[in-house]
Image (tube, grey):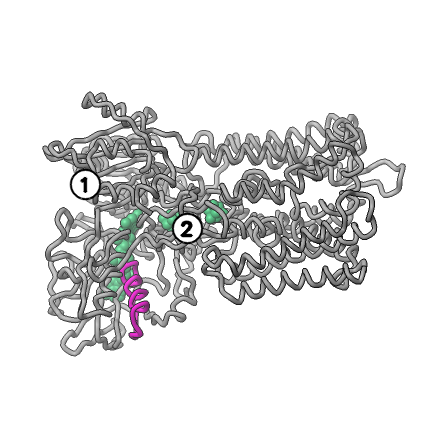
Amino acid sequence: MAAVNPSLSLIGARTHQVLNAGQKGALTLTGIGLLLLFLAFFGVSLPAPTVWLVVSLLALGLGGAWYGWAAYRQLPAGIKNNGVWLASLTSRGILGWLTAIVLTGFYVLLYFFPAHLGLATVAGEANQGIVGFFDPLSRVLNGNPASQWFVYGTLYTVAILAMGVKFIYKYRHNRYQVVRTLSVMFFQLGFAFLIPEILSALQQPSMDLKNMWPLNYYFFYDWNIKKLATSGGLGIFMLGWGVAMIFVVSPVLTYLYGKRWYCSWVCGCGGLAETAGDPFRQLSDKSLGAWKVERWVIHSVLVLAVIMTLAVLHSFFRSNPATYWVTREMFLGVAIATLLGVALLLWLRPRVFKGVPVWVKGLATVLLIGIVVLTLQAYLQNQSRIFGLSSYKLREWYGFYIGSIFSGVIGVGFYPIFGSRVWCRFGCPMAAILGLQQRFFSRFRITVNGGQCISCGNCSTYCEMGIDVRAYAQRGQDVVRASCVGCGICAAVCPRGVLRLENSAADVSTRAAALRTLHLDPKEGVRLL
Amino acid sequence: MHVVIIGNGISGITAARFIRKHSDFAITVISNESDEFFSRTALMYVYMGHMRLRDTQPYEPGFWKKNRIDRKRGWVQKIDQGDRVLYLADGERISYDRLIIATGSRSNKFGWPGQDLDRVHGLYHLQDLEAMEAASAGLERAVIVGGGLIGVEMAEMFHSRHIPVTFLVRETSFWDIVLPPEESAMINRHLLEQGIDLRLNTELREVVGDEQGRAVGVITQSGEEIACGFVGLTAGVSPNIGFLQNSGIEVKRGVLVDENLQTNIPGIYAVGDCAEMRTPQPGRRPIEAVWYTGRMMGETVAHNICNPDTPVAYNPGIWFNSAKFFDIEYQVYGDIRAQAPANHRSLYWEHPDGRRSIRIVYDAGTEVVLGFNVMGIRYRHEVCQHWLAQKATIETVLCELPLANFDPEFFPAYEAFVLAKYAQQTGKQIQTNHRRGLREVLTLLGK
Ligand SMILES: Cc1cc2nc3c(=O)[nH]c(=O)nc-3n(C[C@H](O)[C@H](O)[C@H](O)COP(=O)(O)OP(=O)(O)OC[C@H]3O[C@@H](n4cnc5c(N)ncnc54)[C@H](O)[C@@H]3O)c2cc1C
Ligand code: SF4
Ligand code: SF4
């Protein structure tokens, strides 16, 4: 608006962001943990490095948790968003940008220059720097020296645990938030971190059992399949489990509860976004334009992931025809039937897809059939290339642009700029699939409480997925959106008790239809409900 | 046909949106306050840093162009209803075919000495927020006068910036003209727990100023002086209709309208805070200065302007409202009185933590339920509305009580305590055979 008085730009006002003694102590402790990491990074070697590693990790974890305790414990339980848009870190101020730059830098080193983190590049050489710093812990857990991924996984887990504790203090009046956060902490610590490490210590194939395709895009890579298929019963179980997750567990749970069962209860990316990323959730873009970009980008990534996986599996079965009881024909049969099945559903079930423009259905159908035709062509001509592309090239690109740049560098590095769920919203192919299921085949919705909405905007502001929840709430329409991860924060921050996340099978195909606030009836006048 | 709407608050904007839905009329919305429609109810959150001003604006800037709603910044000074022309303060003339007055309210001032000093403000318009912002730097204490919803919001605003607040409330207990005694006491306690210097039974005598004309303190009726750098006047609001004097449009406290929301002049309507019903619906007040009624009036007036042959009467349905006092949410459905008349019987349960309660009021004779008042607990609008419309008795409601709950999943259930309370009060044991959740709600509502 042109005529805003500049005094309303509140930045620079007296915000009284005073830290209490506990918060200062906690920040100091966290600072010590970070300092030790920096010292390791710059190659300063300390005597008794194992002790310092333990000190550093404890300082980071306890410092973060203590900060949450000190910040919220003495305040009455309730919503704690005072000053969010007044503080530099959380309103894209200087601190926000600095944090983004440091985080991004870390991801660039991690993905592309691990040697700068001290990873040994020559076989037989010892790790240096920060990777070397983590060697003792890695040896204890899996018997081997650390890799950059071990460092990352450890820090990631510490971040989720510490910031999880902070989040729980912040929302201690809200059991949904508490339970959900305990769940992501559990899955990160157990499933993503400890179990895979212990499995590899036991010389078993290690796998994060909750990380499913297509988020885990290398699940169907030849080396992974070979590794699992050749490691005895447990490996075979893992292969079967991975496939069952995709085709059975996930559709059923998504039908029952919406995609939240994964995205904000189980997933590691979601776990970091909900804990360490929580202070940045308000930075997501709520505009209609952003929604449009989101739909194009995320579904493109899904298409890419499908094409890449088909290509990889096709060439895998082609070069390993007789090794496994699944043949190339069986695999292609299932894949093609699935793709065509989806295309058919689009047209045979108009009630389910009500509201989807015909051009969207048409585009989806053309894409699905196109993929099938090209796959068949590759099969019939017995080519290793599918879509005219080498599967190696494809997966190299995918791994680089999607797996590294998008999900890591942009997805987490830019938390303080674009909000905490950029990857989940624009990039994650898993979220795309679950989202389509949620939109069309799920009991889940966010119910709007009659006419109680005052259009204040808290819900939209704090939706990390950039959903304009208010647009629905103020016209009394239940929120049914593919991207909603069911974090429940919109319902928590609503000052008028307007929103409730809930499930019911009674009205799955008409969930999004009801407008509850006002109806004008020429006979009865304007009445509510 | 050119429809001109004075005021771009919720009622004026709702009218404009629905006129566009029903018709192709030219629409102009005039406001002196801001170009963009924003949610007045969210002003506090801008000051508190929960949102930026633009986050309180429900529609993107492109919305108005797309829907062909013209916006004009200016103060309407005079209406010439004979020629159907408006005059803006800068002299501009705007002619209209239909006129909607949606000018909202302004803060009350009761003639206190010093009430017009610098740093004495109500909280209603954006400009009030700017004034609060400007006064906040280095502010050592704010005094707030008037214990209603806006006063408590102002207290929370200053509190969020660690500025000490003294809160002068004339009544013996907070907002006890609306809240029943137990709920009112709960808010008293909560304000103290938050660290607000709450002074009940305390009235303002005058505001004290310094040589520069700035407020530096207040004196209460009992003679106590309280030094402060800001005085908030939040003793209610009244219709903002001063500019209608001598226009020929009939006014009392607000602009008088019939049941179709038309004034005494055909073609001129009034909606929202500034409208006063000549014959309000039974049990309703002539002026209801809340968001929801503004929205419903806006929709009604749009219908009546676009369908002059089939006008509808304004019918707001059951009374409902909600608010939040610091951390305690409040919702009300139906007829809840601060002072219960003889035929009202109350079933009241309060959580031992003193921050949550459920009140169900029913008729002592017929046992028909009349209203619900919940603190710190959310209730489902549609279910309460359903019971009230069905004239359900207290026993039916208690039996179905879990269906009313709208708290997030995993929240503790309190229905058993309410039933136990009822058994204790009446000796009647009620069993509920319903479970919380949407499935049974949909069944109850027949969906
Ligand atoms: C701080 C605060 C919190 C509130 N919280 C709640 C709540 O939680 N729930 C609830 O139900 N209600 C709440 N209310 C009340 C609610 O905001 C009002 O009932 C509602 O905004 C009234 O809308 P309206 O469209 O009638 O008028 P307004 O929103 O007041 O809009 C009228 C507009 O017209 C302009 N105007 C006036 N005269 C002229 C003129 N002569 N020329 C040009 N323009 C003019 C005004 O400047 C204003 O912009 C709250 C109010 C305040 C101030
Ligand atoms: S709509 Fe609500 S529950 Fe869904 S992602 Fe946004 S804030 Fe979370
Ligand atoms: S749903 Fe709640 S938070 Fe969202 S705009 Fe409405 S009142 Fe505000």
Q: Nearer the viewer, residue B64 or A472?
A: A472
Residue A192 image position (x, y, % from top left): 66, 36
- Amino acid on which disc 1 is placed: Lys
Residue A348 image position (x, y, % from top left): 51, 59
**Residue drawn at (69%, 39%), measured in percent from left and top?**
A240
On the question of residue B444 being in view, the answer is yes
Q: Which residue is mark 1?
A: B391
Residue A511 — which label? 2
- Amino acid on which disc 2 is placed: Arg
Q: Nearer the viewer, residue A455 or A447?
A: A447
Residue B443 image position (x, y, % from top left): 33, 42
Residue B92 included in the magenta stretch of the image: no
Tell me how many marks there are.
Answer: 2
* Circle 1 residues within 10 Å: few <14, some 14–19, many ≥20: some
Residue A193 image position (x, y, % from top left): 68, 34
Quick check: B392 above or below B421? below
**Residue drawn at (76%, 48%), measured in percent from left and top?**
A327
* Circle 2 residues within 10 Å: few <14, some 14–19, many ≥20: many
Quick check: A343 above or below B4? above
Stretch of the chain drawn in magenta: B8-30
